Amino acid sequence: MPAFTKGEERNKLIILVLNHALDTELTSEQIYRAVFEGNYMSYFDYQNAMYELEENGWIAAIPRPIGQVYRITPAGEEALASLIDTVPAAIRKEISEYAQKNRDELQEETRFPNSMEELSDGTYMVRLAVIDGNRTEMRVEMRVQTREIAQNMRNNWRKAAYGVYSDAFRALSSKEEIPSSPKD
């Protein structure tokens, strides 16, 4: 029976198991949300583990249009393969189930990022994007009057993004003259 890791080593291995199970690029926020939901470690322990994993070359920080994402490296895969038995089977199973349940949603979050910011005048700036790998296909910034509208836009973005992109592309690339909008 293998001895189970504890403390810092356990935290690093949990992050590696998660990255391996999801097999996709993840933002720091996405990784932390997963370890938080599993109640595996505190925020400070998470930050320390991520720092050490990157320093050891077991995860790589990759710049993307949405910001920095992380992926397990070949060295991280090798380390995980040799140490996987030191992570309790129950934790590995929980992480595997989390990955199966959340993989598509996490990938959509990185494909259709959105954010909002309250401005000094009480309005909100909503930022929406369509990302394809390392390319930004479309970015939209809109100022709206209320937090509710901003949140609705963020909530609807993933489902509406393809239609918005398609409509904007069709309208803007058309050779036909677009009628000017009526003045108020």
Image (cartoon, helix red, strand yellow):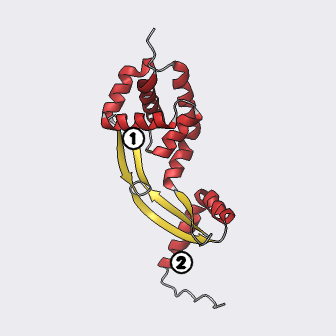
In the displayed structure, does residue 152 sit left or right of residue 16? right
- The residue drawn where x is 41% and y is 47% is 69
Where is residue 162 drawn, in percent x and y? 56, 62
Residue under label 1, please give it. 71
Q: Is residue 102 above or below residue 173?
A: above
Q: Is residue 85 visible?
A: yes
Residue in front for this viewpoint, 46 or 163: 46
Query: Position of 169 compared to 151: left or right?
Result: left
Q: Which mark is residue 79?
A: none
Q: Outermost residue toward the front?
A: 120
First in sequence, mark 2 or 1: give its number: 1
Q: Which residue is mark 2?
A: 171
Q: Nearer the viewer, residue 69 or 40?
A: 40
Q: Give the vertical position of 38 relative to 145 (above or below).
A: above
User: With respect to residue 111, does 38 lie above or below?
Assistant: above
Q: Secondary structure at mark 2?
A: helix
User: How busy is the neighbourhood of tag 1: few (under 14 within 10 Å), some, or many (20 plus)?
Assistant: many
Q: Quadrant of the C terminus?
A: bottom right
Give amino acid for label 1: Arg
- Location of residue 27 in the rendering, given as x and y in whole percent from the top left corner: 46, 46
Q: Residue at x 57, y 34 (%)?
A: 98
Report which quarter residue 93 is drawn in.
top right
Task: Check disc 2 and give the amino acid type.
Answer: Ala
Q: Residue at x 50, y 72 (%)?
A: 169
- Residue 47: x and y in percent read 44, 38
Under tag 1, what secondary structure?
strand
Residue 117, by quadrant, is: bottom right
Q: Going by the picture, which residue comes out furthest to the right? A: 148
Tell me whether circle 2 and circle 1 mark residues in contact (CB < 8 Å). no
Alpha-carbon neighbours of circle 2 within 10 Å: few (<14), some, or many (≥20)? few
Q: Where's residue 87, x and y in %?
A: 47, 21
